[in-house]
Amino acid sequence: MAEFILQRVARGDAQAVRDLLDRYGGLVYALARRFCYEPGEIDDATQDIFLALWKSAVRFDPTVGSEETFVAMIARRRLIDRRRRSSRRLASTEDADVGQSMAPASDNQRRFADNELAARALEAMAELRPEQQLVLRLAIMQGLSHDQIAKVTGIPLGTVKTHVRRGLIALRESMGRAASMMHNEES
Amino acid sequence: MSRPTPDNPNLRFHAASAAGGKSGMQGHPVPDRLRIEQLLIERATSGLDAASEADLKLLLQRTNTAFDESYELAAAAADVALNPPAPKAALPAELQQRILAAGDQWLARRAAGEADAVEYDALPMDIAEPLARITPRLAEQRTAGSVVRQYGGWLAAAACLGLAVLVTLRRDGAEPLPGQQVASGTQTIKDAAKTIEDQVRSLLGDASTVVVSLLSDGDASTKAADLIGPPTPAAQVIWSGEHQQGFVRISGLAPIEQPGDQYQLWVFDTLRGGDTAIPLGVFDVKNADQATLVPITTPLRIGHAATFAITVERAGGSLQPSLNSLVVIGGEDVSEPIGPAQPKAEPAAQPQAEPPSAAPAVKPSGPAQ
């Protein structure tokens, strides 16, 4: 099985640093644009994420999750931390896509769903009730706190917490099954 | 990346954390494992404030639970599935060049072995007291500790384990840690001793293993002993950074008379953002005249174990060392690396320190006095 880019980065392979940027630059930049508000901040955040990826590449385990998911996880962690540090909330809660229910997967989503884990995530989300989907979407995609979600949706705080918890646990279990299947197929 | 771990069976309840965390329902206690799950889920979605982050670290340490990244992975997978980047999405050229230049700098720092160029832990446990607040005499004692290091006593202690008291590191004063060996009967003790002796031999033959002598902290008798010869270590630690495994051998500590107190072992890891104390577990000493060998178990990766210390804490252990209860402390002398390739001729502190003839390629450190 070919070595993953992150595994090569962990070994200090200079070409792998370039390959990682080529392969995931678009994904990281897209996440940074969604979490940040100013162009300069987006660039700084993107660079910060790649530094975090190089440093943490040693922890990537392909039997637990895909490389894309690991990259996205590190990127989200850095972006959420950055948002926390700057003590900035979303520019406006009206920006949150509150009224939108889960739409059918777009072509773009389907293309991305070639990634088995992403496909499983879409399936797991689709199995949730609409209200759960909405709450989870606001939490994951918009990064809203439970309090903010309760405020903008009118759903009681306790219910919001329950929806996020159950939704994420369902996603986690689905991811675990997918990762296990992928690992078994590869081995 | 941490693998998902089963829920820790520890069901200690608490109403709300001292660090300011929230309980699940107002006024109702929340089991530790559920509180950890709450915090991990919140961390994966909207992130944690500083108080909740500290709360999570304390809970993970107290319950000896590994940090579980699976919630963050699930959130990330859902995020990229619902918001996939455009197929030809790419970075602006200027930003790409900037990042590549930063990449070259990182590669150079990594090649130079700079400590912070690689992060082994997803959640650095940097909550404990800085080492500098424990003792200002550390530098002196590091030097003293290096003088008395020797190997033979380790093998003797391991070989005699069937006669000695085997005290296991315990979690919250309760059951042994998973995978830990427990001596519960004569046969079991012999079996365990064989296994531990093998482990000790293996560790002593490992180039990454350090041996650290722990001495009293500023004790008047120790100072006097310094004047006439090497101080006698009350405890010694062998630790392999590569294998993340070690033992502490206690040979000079008295049983604690105060009911409800236990000894607790700490390591100061200089790769965790400075000198911070990481708890390695609690143990009892039942007889000061018998050597006691305690396996070291830690869910955290120890980067550079520069210094070890033993304090007296409440039963079950503390999250931070009590400054006024430091019993012994000792540090690795980095100028004198310990390992089989470079044996040192040093005076042995204990007569029984001669290793068995079947000792590995490790040369015992010098003749007895």
Image: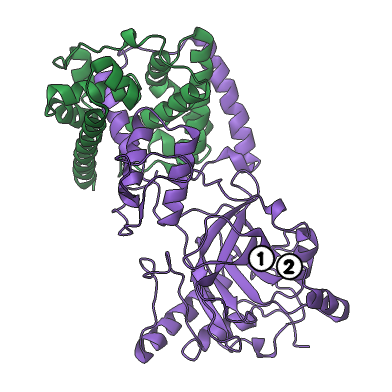
Q: Say which colour chain A has.
A: green
- Residue in view at x 68 percent, y 66 percent: B329
Label 1 chain ID: B
Q: Is residue A100 left or right of residue B5?
A: left
Whether residues under marks 1 and 2 lie with C-beta atoms below 8 angstroms apart, the answer is yes
The numbered mark, 1 or 2, whose residue comes first in the sequence reads 2
**Residue with the mark numbered 1:** B326
Label 2 chain ID: B
Mark 2: which amino acid?
A: Asp
The spot of residue A87 in percent (x, y) is 50, 20
**Residue with the mark numbered 2:** B217
Q: Residue furthest front?
A: B27
Q: Which chain comes out purple in the rendered image?
A: B
- Residue A57 against residue B157 in the figure, above or below: above
Instruction: Name the colour scheme.
Output: by chain
**Residue A164 seen from this side:** yes
So how many labels did they put on this image?
Answer: 2
Q: In the picture, which quadrant includes the N terminus of chain A? A: top left
The spot of residue B96 in percent (x, y) is 51, 15
Q: Residues within 10 Å of mark 1 (few under 14, many from 20)?
A: many
Q: Of helix, strand and loop, which one carries label 2?
A: loop
The spot of residue A162 in percent (x, y) is 22, 34
**Residue A66 seen from this side:** no
| Mark-to-mark CA distance, 1 and 2 | 7 Å
Q: Of helix, strand and loop, which one carries label 1?
A: strand
- Residue in view at x 28 percent, y 22 percent: A150
Residue B194's quadrant in the figure? bottom left
Q: Residues within 10 Å of mark 2 (few under 14, many from 20)?
A: many
- Depth check: give the residue in front, A97 or B354: A97
- Residue A99 against residue B51 in the figure, above or below: above
Mark 1: which amino acid?
A: Leu
